[in-house]
Image (cartoon, rainbow, N blue to C red):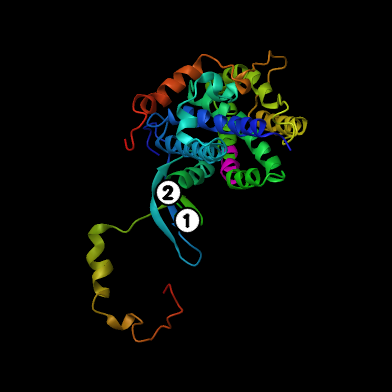
Amino acid sequence: MKKDNQWPLWEVFIRSKQGLNHKHVGSLHATDQQMAIKNARDVYARRNEGVSIWVVKSEHIHASSPDKNDCFFDPANDKVYRHPTFYNIPDQIDHM
Amino acid sequence: MQNQASYITFLTRLADNNLILGHRLSEWCGHGPELEQDIALINVALDLIGQSRFLYQKIGDLEQKTEDQIAYFRDAGQFYNLLLCELPNEHFGTTILRQYLYDQFHYLVLEQLISSSDEFLVSYAKKSIKEVEYHVMQSKAWVIRLGDGTEKSHQKIKASLDKLWPYTDEFFMMDSVEDPLLEAEKIKKQWLVKVNQTLSEATLEAPEQTWPQKGGKWGKHTEHLGFILADMQFLQRAYPDAKAW
């Protein structure tokens, strides 16, 4: 981390209920993983938001580059056959 | 079964501990050493104040008063909180150690109340113990972190421990009000085991011989409580009939 006297930054992911995926909710500072999970509980899960918390050090997240968006994402735009939209999904299946 | 006056004193002691300590913690709002710790401390403050409300409402039912009348229209001599709960926050280390010493005690009290024969206390304890279990986790981790941290953090929390320790004897000085509902000796034994474990993990040691500080449970307070009440009660007393703030 940078030497700016800040604790390391962590990204927080919360599963809001069983069956759903963990979703990124924000970031926070903490010195280690135990503290990061407790802080995440206090900062992001105090209004009943979740049933499970993941934390990952921000430095371990690698992102795609915005200037490569054209070649990364545009080619998928006109390929409708890649989406399984031709099936009827039963109502009982909530989270597809 | 104890008489109603004694039962109300019992509830008042529990409630006042939580209200006064909760108020003390709330003084950290906006001043926490880190944003995340600021929020964490205030969460605990809100838990404690919420627990005190639950109890004041019960007392209010028994005495035909509102919870606000009980919280805001009593003077220092009618508050029965432990002296430890009213001590100043000082630095984060003192605050979190004060919290740990109380949390660990609080947890053991609730654990006994869960198996008491009083229906109200059982429901109160069941609801609160989950919150308090987290309080213990949180404050304990910080005591270990600071005690076993840098030389400076160790020295500072050691000084806090020497200062706060004499106030812990009051936890276990139980009288006819508590005797029917709590086993003081058992709580003391369990508390010492748990706290000494934590202190040794934190490379700290409890002071050996101290002069016990007591009085809060019987309405005899340090000079600090008056300042807390002045702060906490001013608005209600200045505008007693106000319906909205």
Chain holding disc 1: A
Q: Is residue B213 above or below residue A93?
A: above
**Element at badge 1?**
loop
**Element at badge 2?**
helix
Residue positioned 58% across, 23% down in the render:
B84
Q: Position of residue B116 (x, y in %)?
A: 71, 43
Q: Give the range drawn in magenta.
A: B130-136
Main secondary-structure element of the magenta-colored stretch: helix
Mark 1, residue position: A50
Total numbered circles: 2
**Mark 1 Cα shell of 10 Å, populated few (<14), some (14-19), many (≥20):** some
Report if the CB atoms under discs 1 and 2 are less than 8 Å apart.
Answer: yes
Q: Does residue B205 appear in this view?
A: no
Of all residues, the one furthest to the front in this rendering is B64
Mark 1 vs mark 2, CA separation in Å: 9 Å
Mark 1 or 2 closer to N-term? 2
Identify the amino acid type marked 2: Tyr
Chain holding disc 2: A
Mark 2, residue position: A44
Q: Position of residue B86 (x, y in %)?
A: 53, 22
